[in-house]
Image (cartoon, rainbow, N blue to C red):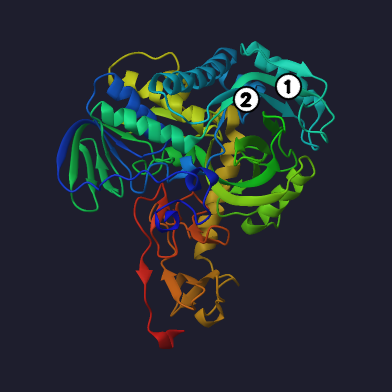
Amino acid sequence: MINDLKTSGTHISYWTNSVVPRMYKPLDKNIDTDIVIVGGGISGITMAYELTLRGRDVVIIEDGMIGSGETGRTTAHLTCALDDRYYHLENVHGKEKAKLAAESHNAAIGYIETIVKNEQIDCDFERLDGYLFLHPSDKIESLKKEFEATREAGLKTEWLDNVPGIGKESGPCIKFPAQAQFHIMKYLHGLCTAIEKRNGKIFTETHAAKIDEKGIETTGKHRVNANHVVIATNTPVNNRFVIHTKQSPHRTYVIGARVQKGLSKALWWDTGDQEIKGTAQPYHYVRMAALDDQHDLLICGGEDHMTGVADNDVPEENRYGRLEQWTRERFPVEEVVYRWSGQVMEPMDGMAFIGRNPMDSDNTYIVTGDSGNGMTHGTIAAMIIPDLIEGKQHPWAGLYDPDRFKFLSVGQNFIRDNTIVVRELIKGYAHHPELKALREVKKDEGRIVEIKGEKYGAYRDARDMLHIVSVQCPHLGCIVRWNNDENSWDCPCHGSRFTIEGKVINGPSNSDLSYYHFPEETF
């Protein structure tokens, strides 16, 4: 049943596969509310929960099922060990704001723990330690520098000579005490129950086709009129340009491997491949989850790359094999039983964008730039934006302000990633050797083809049927690329993604690619 529901990938994650999907009826009439939230993931659902606690009238609009977007494709680490090193945050934001970053992520974990307790949500929440250790390409000096920076930021980290729980990793590590993990879908479902109990309204399979300061209009032409509008869609579909020049989309890959019960439970991360130059070095991240009476599921992620640009000559679908090899070298894996991928929005300066939407009305808010810490960043949003809606000052608001621009501090990252955007835009319109005739498209293959002088995306399914779409992304016109792992058309400029029938499954595009049926003699 899950495969028939709208999700942001063809691979099904452990979280989505281990619960009954949470669906509500689609919106079928015009309604009025105080606050409308677009997006039924960790950010939108947690924010709705907080607002209903405050007695506000809230409506959630989700175009799939609850958690069917990137939230359901996480590994559900809850940690203040951030993807971007604390010494980097010090350089970019200063020591005081690095302290605020540590404080906010720690507070987010505590906030989740409090909700779990107060609402009695059975979601496998548990506190455990985390360990950051060196990637083979990194130097011990960087780990020492990070240890000093974490202590400066107020974290109670510890220096250890060996990495607990991973036999092959014999070098030192930084211990992050009292981190946490949970089952994200069980948690969201518990929040939804609490929201309904407080008269919040949730509508699924409802797409917000038009968004303005007065509310949203669905594809079914029904309106939600609201005093405040919050866009919590992983990347904002109501912000056409400004935010998307300050963050870049990355694909990340996950395997779930069956292991015998009895292994240590912890969170593990390496420091990332320093030989790959990008906004953030791809790194490995590991945790455990309960699977059955005899086995646990060891969840390992990594092998990231910019969306639509599978660099280092490793196609998307081959990333899982590299993850499996890395995992088998360190853990007693019996069998890999899950594979899935997700999308991470990497902000140019390491911190999420949470607050009022730049160049928009004061009543319109966004949440984006998860930077690989989506569970805590999404929760932080639920702590900041309700205060902004109520006209209150929040101590973290400046750090996460979407209007900030740290060009002098991170200009090289900004120039590099936006150079890639421009390169892909220009390359998309040039004649290049990838263009092939439709008849050459093989089963289960997607290609850019040329028909009567025009470009199209063509995918031939297992039944030998061709699915043909326009290739110009509706967001800003870049040419999409075929993702052979998730069978999707991905935009290499800003991360919009589309199904084989052109249906949008990731923003910032908020509309579909055109879908065509050509006469049989054409191909």
Whole-number angstrom distance, CA of label 1 to CA of label 2: 10 Å
> Horizontal placement of 235 versus 212: left or right?
right
- Residue contact at pointers 1 and 2, CB within 8 angstroms: yes
Residue 285 in percent (x, y) is at 66, 36
> Horizontal placement of 49 versus 103: left or right?
left
Res 99 → quadrant: top right
Query: Dot 2: few (<14), some (14–19), or many (≥20) neighbours within 10 Å?
Result: many
Res 174 label: 1
- The answer to whether one can see residue 237 in this image is yes
Residue 289 in percent (x, y) is at 60, 36
Res 180 → quadrant: top right
Q: How many discs appear?
A: 2
- The answer to whether one can see residue 366 in this image is no
Depth check: give the residue in front, 266 or 343: 266
Q: Give the amino acid at mark 1.
A: Ile
Q: Residue at x 45, y 38 (%)?
A: 185
Q: Give the amino acid at mark 2.
A: Ala
Instruction: Answer above or below: position of 154 versus 276.
Output: above
Q: Secondary structure at mark 2?
A: loop
Location of the N terminus (image quadrant): bottom left
Q: Residue furthest front?
A: 293
Instruction: Answer above or below: position of 4 versus 400.
Output: below
> Horizontal placement of 9 versus 318: left or right?
left
Res 452 → quadrant: bottom left
Residue of label 2: 81
Residue 80 in percent (x, y) is at 58, 23
Res 276 label: none
Q: Secondary structure at mark 1?
A: strand
Q: Residue furthest bottom?
A: 521
Depth check: give the residue in front, 307 or 404: 307
Instruction: Answer above or below: position of 96 versus 326.
Output: above
Residue 173 in percent (x, y) is at 76, 24
